[in-house]
Image (tube, helix red, strand yellow):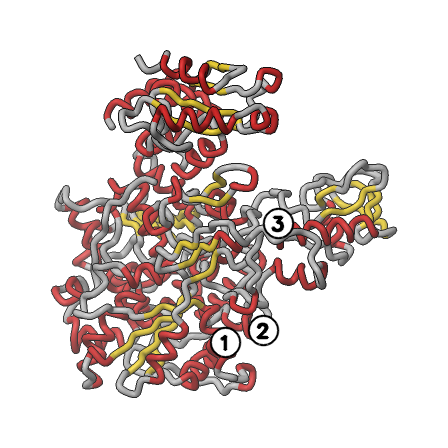
Amino acid sequence: MYHIGNMVKELAEKYGRKRESLMPILQDIVKKYNYLTDDAMVAVATELDISAAEVYGTASFYTFLDTEERGKNIIRVCKTITCSMKGKNDIISTLEDILKIKVGETTPDKMFTLLETNCIGWCHKAPAILINDMPYTDLTPETVIDVVKGYMR
Amino acid sequence: MVTLKINEHEIKVAEGTTVLEAAKKLSINIPTLCNHQDLCVAGNCRVCVVEQKGARTLIAACAMPVSQGMEIQTNSLKVRNARKHIVELLLSEHRADCTKCYKNQKCELQTLANEYSFGEHIFLDLVEGHAYTIDRSSPAFLKDDSKCIRCQRCVRTCAQLQHVSAIAVANKGSHMKISSFHDRPMSHVVCTNCGQCVNRCPTGALTEKTYIDQVWDAIYDTDKHVVVQTAPAVRVALGEDLGYDPGERVTGKLVTALRQLGFDSVLDTDFTADLTIIEEGTELLTRLKKVLVEGDKTLALPMFTSCSPGWIKFIEHKYPQMLPNLSTCKSPQQMFGALAKTFYAQKRGIDPSKIVSVSIMPCTAKKYEADRPEMRSSGYKDIDYVLTTRELAVMIKQAGIDFRALEESHYDSFMGSSTGAGVIFGATGGVMEAALRTAYEIVTGRSVPFKNLNILPVRGMEGVKEATIKIEGTVEEWRFLEGAELKVAIAHGLVNANKIAKAVSTGKASYHFIEIMACPGGCLGGGGQPIPTNAEIRQKRMEAIYSEDMHMDIRKSHENPEIIAIYEEFLEKPNGHKSHELLHTHYTKRESY
């Protein structure tokens, strides 16, 4: 992909080509494209003169550096104990119903990806979800529909 | 110097020594798993934990530097209990189907289990129900994640020794694994099949793909004529797997053993090593003439050697723009294969379709090389099966042969005669030395100006070696080289090969001829050699190679009588039409990941 190559070059100019430049470069790519394509990872490897397996190794360590295709909006439902006890399963089945996908999948129009996540620190306002960088808390099946509808426009 | 006590024994060691090294000096054994002499410290398996007086927790002996007044216990109750737990935790995530495992009785984890973990296990078996990948995609090796204990010797090998990093650590926690780029099959990534990781894996997670059964089948098939060739580095290492000390030459016994195994003809890769020298030496001299005198722009200098299939795959992935710099000569294994089913078949009056061609190699990449689609110039698969030195040792044991008691014998003919120049192919610098012995003589009509033909500047274990040979007193045909300085370089281990390749690709190097071997030490340190292989053992094998050379009657490739004969009877002339058909090849650009 021509534009990814150019973007990686620009990012390497900005952050440098040392090993420690890898993280900020990957973060910026994810910020723009939601996930890291294989082409993007290979372009970064070439630019920093490291192996593509190492770039993938680093990316795969971090939950927020996705290496699989993701939609424009990534919904992460907290699966940890408190949210589980406060009805996270209902939230998930509601989301699966309205988005017509299962956890781990992306809608055909590439608008939404539905994922589970480990604790996001909102136990006192469980159940909680993240949509992209925005937390939504104290959810019920009814309120989560409204939240997601806000992203459907 | 630092003074410390280990198990009440006082010892003085240099600052920076690790507790593990200090204990070794006292002959105190501390078990290790992730540690390897060729690699940096990792400290991740924890098997080497010891107790330090006054310390809050146990420490990893491999990673802890000594300090003044330190008091260490390597065998306290606390240490023994911890080690037992550590070994059992490793076992809880390891598919321990030991009796079916290729590494049975050669597995370092099994050895530790034998010492620390018998009876009921404390921890749950986590292997069942976990989806592991077994990657069989490479013709050279298997990667079985269910046996991986994630010690990362392979990852460090691939990065530090080979500068390839075809594999890296991916994911985290219980999902952590050793992965290629995005879990691609190993046959579809930058992996060179060098097998250095296979040689270092402490368990059965990385093993060569074995063809022992197929070779037995061929031997027992009376309809087949099975020829075997043995690479130079095999004869100086095979003994290690059969009870000999490193560095013992077992050439004569090796030949007898192969005959007893039932091979119909026992021949020598050294013969085609000599042939490689004639072809490659001629190619070099021709390139020099065409580029430097005639200004031919289609040929590239410097010329790289092409014997090492790991190096070939490396350059195909990483420096495809320099493929024209590679010699077009096939490796000795493949030259042998092409000749076995053409020239040899004709000479012996055997139908080539009935010939099964087997080679014994110190190498796993040779298995891959034999599988390359272009390696069929005879009209058949030129080499049918490649076995490593280790696999041959297994076959010798399977056959119940008492190796030590064997008489020595000589290779069969034709294609069994060789010279000292062919033998030294097995050591880094050897191809260069063999080539110089011949090329210098072609150009000047005299022997190379080194005592006893030993070109010492190109020998030794330094990562990158350079030498300059001044050419004087040339014969008429090569007068243009009069007074010229031939600049050569040698690298072994792909991390060093990469340094030279980078220098050449950026125009910072002005060599004419470069020898590259993918493995540290050259073929003698190949991925198919006995385990363990480390610096000390490589050194001993190297001494054995040069001693083998000194014991040969003929030490220049062009004086090999069978080489002279094959040009008269079959090939006609070096780099001629027949040579190009059978002995030369081409290369393929590959992806960067």
Instruction: Say left or right for A26 vs B404.
Output: left
Q: Which residue is mark 2?
A: B244
B202 shown above or below B241 = above
Disc 1 element: loop
Q: Nearer the viewer, residue B430 or B214?
A: B214
Q: Residue at x 16, y 62 (%)?
A: B580
Tag 2: amino acid: Tyr
Q: Identify the residue at the far front of this view.
A: A142
Q: Position of residue B288 (x, y in %)?
A: 21, 49
Q: Position of residue A25 (x, y in %)?
A: 41, 22
Badge 2 vs badge 3, beta-carbon distance below 8 Å: no
Quadrant location of the C terminus of chain B in the rendered image: top left
Which one is earlier in the sequence, the residue at label 1 or at label 3? 3
Q: Position of residue B292 (x, y in %)?
A: 19, 44
Q: Which residue is mark 1?
A: B250
Which one is earlier in the sequence, the residue at label 1 or at label 2? 2
| Quarter of the image where one finds residue B389 | bottom left
B383 shown above or below A119 = below
Disc 3 element: loop
Q: Position of residue B420 (x, y in %)?
A: 39, 70
Disc 2 element: loop
- Crowd tier of the residue under label 3, counting other residues whose Cα lies within 10 Å: few below 14, some 14–19, many 20 or above: many
Badge 1 vs badge 2, beta-carbon distance below 8 Å: yes
Tag 3: amino acid: Asn
